[in-house]
Amino acid sequence: MGKTAIERLIDFIDYLKSDRRGGRTNFERTVGISEGYITNALKKKASIGTEVISKIGVAYPELNVNWLLTGEGQMLKTKDNNRSEQAIEKYIQEIEALKIRINDLEKIIETQDTLISMLSKK
């Protein structure tokens, strides 16, 4: 059997902790729920209320709420990831084009240096 919503929420909080964004207490403050809410829900194996899920979604827009509720998909929304990957690919292409341009300019400089050397010997 898969994880419950509260267990998935713990996974998200662990992710936040690994990203140096705080643990359960900081999460509860950020979301605006009472301190100990997560621990109590975990102990009682309680479900997360819709109001709390709504607050979590507002406080952490990168969290895939569908994943939190159902366990389907990825923990984090991928729209921003796709945008980042596209930007990275664009920058890589620009860097490659600039490397080619630099190489061409270095060849021109080398040719000019040779020409200057030949002309100065005359």
Image (cartoon, rainbow, N blue to C red):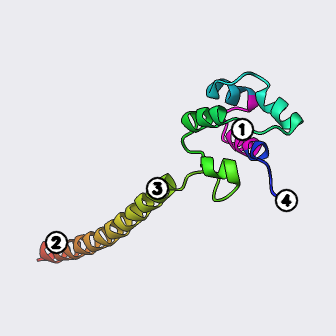
Q: CA distance from mark 2 to mark 4?
A: 78 Å
Q: Which residue is mark 3?
A: 84
- Please state if 46 lies on the left or on the right of 63 as rendered: right
- Please state if 103 lies on the left or on the right of 23 as rendered: left
Q: CA distance from mark 3 to mark 1?
A: 23 Å
14 within the magenta span: yes
x, y (%) of residue 4? 79, 48
Residue numbers of the magenta segment: 9-24
**Earlier residue among tags 3 and 4:** 4
- Please state if 47 lies on the left or on the right of 98 as rendered: right
- Please state if 108 lies on the left or on the right of 21 as rendered: left
- Of badges 2 and 3, the one in the foreground is 3
The mark found on residue 93 in the picture is none
x, y (%) of residue 113? 22, 71
x, y (%) of residue 65? 61, 46
Q: Which residue is mark 4?
A: 1
Q: Secondary structure at mark 2?
A: helix
